[in-house]
């Protein structure tokens, strides 16, 4: 079960910390289960929203925003990425939605039991905070004092905080670890979602209808690729997972749907590496009464429009207009 004695020792240490957390929760009137693994928390703001609101403020502006007092009540949630305890105070890094916030907790502010709960936490645990205080000289929300709640204890240690998760195979096998250890990986998911939204807006604005076609097909057509095989028990029929949606989209055009498109999954039982997946997403669109000149112009507009709408900086070179012969010599 354990790869080393060190890993076993670390796991047992965290089990002991979890037991301590349960005892502190029971002392506060909770059950052991509710104290160690609560199932909900009503957050009022996210870390990105908090930073966007309070980071630009000076100390004077912060005090004015809090009505002359020193505290603003908020409730945020996130994952502890690092934690340090120094006597009666401590610092922690809380991460949520790809952004981090440094926390400062003092025993005199939160009380003995809450501070004991803070010391029992370990990196990887989900944590919740309340009460933003004027703790930094420049009024930044960074390094604030909070009342502490713990949600879920991580029983396994995070990868090395200095080197992160560098093993390529492990990053793809345990994508969830890669996501919270390397915040920049989250941007890939954010950009992909922005691209898909922009594609749909582009085609919808031009009168195209988004459709869904069968994933399991009797004949895997529309491309030259090896399909995955499956069997339909109710029909006693051998089927293939589709390698392309082409044939069914063309049938819709024949049926009178002049403009259709589909963004969906395809499956090709072929090679695999970090940039090629047998299961992948494809866009296909069809338009009646148009030739390749129309589609070439539309494709050019699609790429430039999606690049602009995805709200990311793109350096796109103007596409060259070449004949098939010219393109062969350019290749």
Image (cartoon, rainbow, N blue to C red):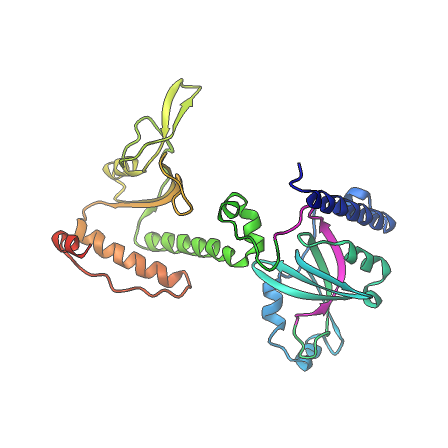
- Looking at the image, which residue sits at the far top? 236
- Looking at the image, which residue sits at the far bottom? 60
- Rendered location of residue 195, percent (x, y): 40, 55
Q: Quadrant of the C terminus?
A: bottom left
Q: In the drawing, does residue 70 fall left or right of residue 240?
A: right
Query: Which residue sits at x=23%, y=37%?
Result: 254
Query: Which quadrant of the structure image shows residue 281?
Result: top left
Query: Which residue sits at x=37%, y=52%?
Result: 200
Q: Is residue 104 above or below residue 38?
A: below
22 or 327, nearer to the observer? 327
196 or 200, nearer to the observer? 196
- Looking at the image, which residue sits at the far front? 5
Residue 77 seen in this snapshot = no
Query: Which residue sits at x=61%, y=68%?
Result: 51
Residue 146: say if magenta: yes
Q: Is residue 304 above or below residue 35?
A: below
Residue 286: say if magenta: no
- Rendered location of residue 147, percent (x, y): 77, 62
- Rendered location of residue 22, percent (x, y): 81, 46
Q: How many marks?
A: 0
Q: Quadrant of the N terminus?
A: top right
- Rendered location of residue 52, percent (x, y): 58, 69
Query: Which residue sits at x=32%, y=32%?
Result: 226
Part of the protein shown in magenta: 141-159
Query: Which quadrant of the structure image shows residue 305?
Result: bottom left
Residue 98 seen in this snapshot = yes
């Amino acid at each position: 079960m354990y790869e080393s004695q060190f890993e076993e020792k670390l796991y047992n240490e965290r089990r002991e910390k979890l037991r301590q957390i349960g005892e502190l929760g029971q002392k506060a009137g909770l059950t052991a289960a509710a104290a160690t693994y609560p199932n909900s928390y009503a957050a009022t703001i996210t870390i990105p929203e908090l930073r966007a609101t309070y980071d630009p403020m000076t100390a004077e502006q912060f005090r004015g925003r809090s009505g002359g007092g020193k505290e603003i009540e908020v409730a945020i949630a996130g994952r502890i990425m690092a934690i340090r305890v120094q006597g009666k105070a401590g610092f922690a890094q809380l991460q949520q939605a790809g952004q981090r916030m440094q926390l400062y907790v003092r025993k005199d502010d939160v009380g003995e039991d809450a501070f004991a709960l803070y010391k029992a936490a370990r990196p990887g645990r989900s944590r919740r905070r309340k009460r933003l205080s004027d703790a930094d000289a420049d009024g930044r929300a960074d390094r604030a004092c909070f009342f502490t709640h713990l949600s879920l204890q991580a029983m396994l240690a995070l990868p090395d905080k200095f080197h992160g998760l560098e093993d390529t195979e492990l990053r793809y096998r345990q994508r969830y670890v890669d996501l919270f250890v390397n915040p920049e990986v989250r941007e890939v998911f954010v950009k992909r979602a922005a691209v898909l939204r922009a594609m749909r807006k582009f085609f919808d604005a031009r009168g195209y209808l988004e459709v869904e076609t069968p994933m399991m097909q009797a004949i895997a057509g529309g491309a030259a690729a090896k399909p995955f095989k499956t069997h339909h028990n109710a029909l006693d029929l051998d089927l293939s997972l589709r390698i392309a949606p082409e044939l069914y989209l063309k049938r819709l055009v024949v049926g009178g749907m002049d403009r259709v498109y589909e963004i969906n999954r395809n499956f090709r039982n072929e090679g695999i590496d970090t940039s090629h997946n047998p299961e992948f997403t494809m866009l296909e669109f069809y338009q009646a009464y148009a030739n390749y000149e129309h589609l070439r112009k539309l494709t050019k507009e699609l790429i430039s429009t999606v690049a602009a709408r995805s709200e990311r900086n793109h350096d796109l070179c103007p596409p060259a207009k070449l004949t098939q012969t010219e393109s062969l010599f350019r290749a």
